[in-house]
Image: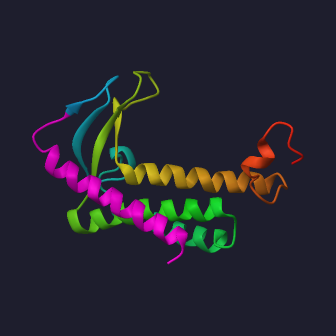
Amino acid sequence: MGGYGVLGLAALLLDLAAKKAARHGLASGPIPLVLGFRLELHANPGVAFGLSRTLGWVIGLLGLVLLAGLTLFYRNKTRHARHGLALLWAGGLSNALERLLLGGVTDFLFIPLPRLPFVPLPGLYVNLADLWLVLGAALLLLELSFHAKGGGRVPSADTLRPGSPG
């Protein structure tokens, strides 16, 4: 297993351990944090952010099929793309395993949202897998944006320093 497999496996195991800890440690009630954030156990039978309680399996399966396609497309790209794929697989597999074994996904962090007319939710319930999915997608978008601009590769930190020749 290469470095990307180790990253994916570590992220998957960390998320599953955090969810198990949340199911046991938060069963007695929420723990307030700051600025309206709180640790709170939330069973999500649907998809992201508690939407569509009946289509969780369908959307989850479609997500894994899409991820398989992205893996074929990005497998020979830069390390940013491979890191992104590892995180996407970790998040996707973790949530899929929970849907299969528990009938839904365990969320444990409540993130409050501002009360605005176009924001119908008071907040979002998330877990580490959601973070892995967002970070993985961001890394793939970074890869795609540099290729779309003709750069071919994501620049290294050295080429971004002021006064460097790159």
> Closer to the camera, 43 or 55?
43
Q: Which residue is painted at 18% across and 35% down in the image?
A: 30
Provide the residue span drawn in magenta: 1-30
Residue 87 image position (x, y, % from top left): 49, 60
Give the farthest residue toward the bottom. Answer: 1
> Closer to the camera, 46 or 15?
15
Residue 26 image position (x, y, % from top left): 16, 43
Q: Main secondary structure of the magenta part?
A: helix
In this rendering, is residue 18 above or below 1?
A: above
User: Is any part of residue 145 visible from this angle?
Assistant: yes
Residue 162 image position (x, y, % from top left): 82, 36
Give the farthest residue toward the right. Answer: 165
Q: Which residue is painted at 31% across and 67% down in the image?
A: 97
Which quadrant of the structure image shows residue 39? Answer: top left
In this rendering, is residue 113 above or below 82?
A: above
- Whether 111 is among the magenta residues is no
Q: How many marks?
A: 0
Residue 58 image position (x, y, % from top left): 39, 64
Q: Say left or right for 151 vs 74.
A: right
> Closer to the camera, 90 or 13?
13
Q: What is the image's colouring?
A: rainbow
Q: Which residue is painted at 34% across and 56% down in the image?
A: 15
User: Is any part of residue 56 visible from this angle?
Assistant: no
Give the farthest residue toward the left. Answer: 28
